[in-house]
Image (tube, rainbow, N blue to C red):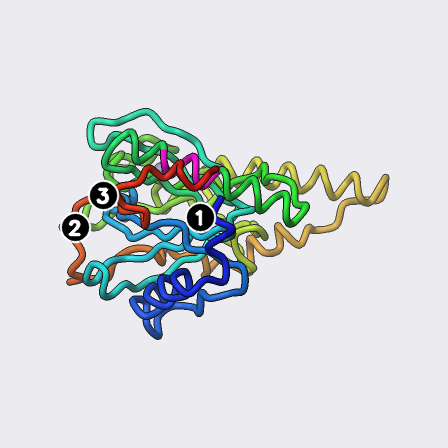
Amino acid sequence: MVDYLANTEINSQRIAAVESCFGASGQPLALPGRVLLGEGVLTKECRKKAKPRIFFLFNDILVYGSIVLNKRKYRSQHIIPLEEVTLETLPETLQAKNRWMIKTAKKSFVVSAASATERQEWISHIEECVRRQLLATGLQPSTEHAAPWIPDKATDICMRCTQTRFSALTRRHHCRKCGFVVCAECSRERFLLPRLSPKPLRVCSLCFRELAAQQQKEDVEEQGLGSPGPSAYLAGAVCGASSGDDDDSDEDREGSGDADWPSRVEFYASGVSWSSFHS
Ligand SMILES: [Zn+2]
Ligand SMILES: [Zn+2]
């Protein structure tokens, strides 16, 4: 694919440019054998609204961040190892076309490209990289994925009790297990979801019942006929009652200036179709 780019000067320069745009807010990205394959602005469906985000596709990781000044300054860097990624094409909505979901065990989210062709390019290149990463690492494709958070605007009422109406005073919360938007009353419980966090997290009442029942079943199986003791997971639900606040590290802080960047993709081989890399 792009193996010939590994350890070339041009590749090092491109990676250095990305590092410099993130500055001190980002991680070092240069690694022997790592190749930067492309970049582009995609629209990411965040909790409050859809926002432009800069994405960089490397042969082993996908990096994204928010845009302070295009091609100059980025922040809030996120790094996703590609061997953990699976993609799912999504139907269009009234607000967005060319959507797909990027799913990992820790976090799943929806992005969209400016055109169907761009979406296809992103998907085929990411999938090719994932395939190669799995081959290289000997890992299996991941099967369990975090539920994407349903955007706040998707509902005015709690998706569990369907009674509570949200307002300035009645806050929306997100269940970390199913991603539903729920009221405080319907998300009193916390549960340890080790894939997501070492701390117990907010879950909705339905997920809590399911998780607790499942945990109890596992405890009983583990302990044979002995009486099931209180599970660590359930204990976590009690002592962790203060954690699980609704912070979404990906949300912009107030007053950030990245609102109006066009959603478009620029691959390095501009003017040349990306598939020329595959030969
Ligand atoms: Zn509710
Ligand atoms: Zn739930």
Residue at mark 3 to residue at mark 2: CA–CA distance: 9 Å
Of mark 3 and mark 1, the one earlier in the sequence is 1
Which residue is denoted by mark 1 in the rendering? 188
Which residue is denoted by mark 3 in the rendering? 264
Q: Which residue is found at the position 50% from the left and 39% from the top?
A: 128
| As drawn, 70 above or below 182 | below
Q: Residue 16 location, x and y as percent?
A: 37, 68
Which region is colored magenta?
121-127
| Element on which disc 1 rests | loop
Amino acid type at circle 3 is Arg
Q: Residue 109 location, x and y as percent?
A: 38, 42
187 or 33: which is nearer to us? 33
Residue at mark 3 to residue at mark 1: CA–CA distance: 41 Å
Q: Residue 141 location, x and y as percent?
A: 60, 39
| Magenta stretch encompasses residue 126 | yes
Horizontally, residue 133 falls left or right of residue 99, namely right
Residue at mark 2 to residue at mark 1: CA–CA distance: 39 Å
Q: Nearer the viewer, mark 3 or mark 2?
A: 3
Q: Nearer the viewer, mark 2 or mark 1?
A: 2
Horizontally, residue 76 falls left or right of residue 205, namely left
Horizontally, residue 168 falls left or right of residue 267, namely left
Discs 2, 1 touching: Cβ within 8 Å? no
Q: Residue 150 location, x and y as percent?
A: 34, 38
Discs 3, 2 touching: Cβ within 8 Å? no
Q: Assess disc 3: are there few (<14), some (14-19) or many (≥20) residues with their C-alpha within 10 Å of its C-alpha.
A: some
Which residue is denoted by mark 2 in the rendering? 261
| As drawn, 17 above or below 102 | below
Amino acid type at circle 2 is Trp
Q: Which residue is found at the position 53% from the left and 42% from the top?
A: 130
Count of numbered badges drawn on the protein = 3
**One can see residue 265 in this view:** yes
